[in-house]
Amino acid sequence: MAAHRAFNVATDIPVYFCDRASPWQRGSNENANGLLRQYFPKGTDLSVHAPEQLATVAAELNSRPRKTLDWETPAERLSRLLAT
């Protein structure tokens, strides 16, 4: 996020940086990490996995409904966003 100031000026969207060692400030990120750990334990070297395997995991996670998205999937929400 080296260009966060330029992003803020161009989009009028504020950029928030969490404090170090404060996982409660980044709940969605922590949730995503937990979902990824169902496939890859903490500390896993992802470079040993084939790109196809990583793409399969990404597709599975992006097709999983999320409470924070009113039970839409990330793929559905992105598709709707891109259509507008």
Image (spheres, helix red, strand yellow):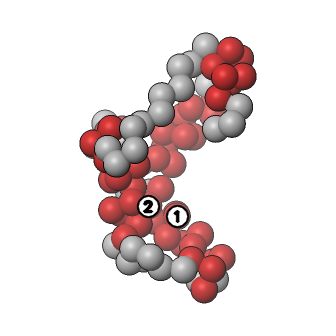
Q: Which residue is mark 2?
A: 61
Q: Check the image and report above or below for 70 versus 55.
A: above
The quarter holding residue 63 reads bottom left
- Residue 73 is labelled as none
The answer to which of 38 and 80 lies nearer the viewer is 38
Q: Residue at x 48, y 28 (%)?
A: 16
Q: Secondary structure at mark 1?
A: helix
Res. 66 visible in picture:
no
Residues at circles 1 and 2 in contact by the CB criterion of under 8 Å: yes
Q: In the figure, is residue 48 to the left or right of 30?
A: right
Q: Residue at x 61, y 25 (%)?
A: 84
Q: Which residue is mark 1?
A: 58
The quarter holding residue 50 reads bottom right
**Amino acid type of the residue tagged 2 in the rendering:** Leu
Q: Residue at x 47, y 79 (%)?
A: 44
**Quadrant that contains the N terminus:** top right
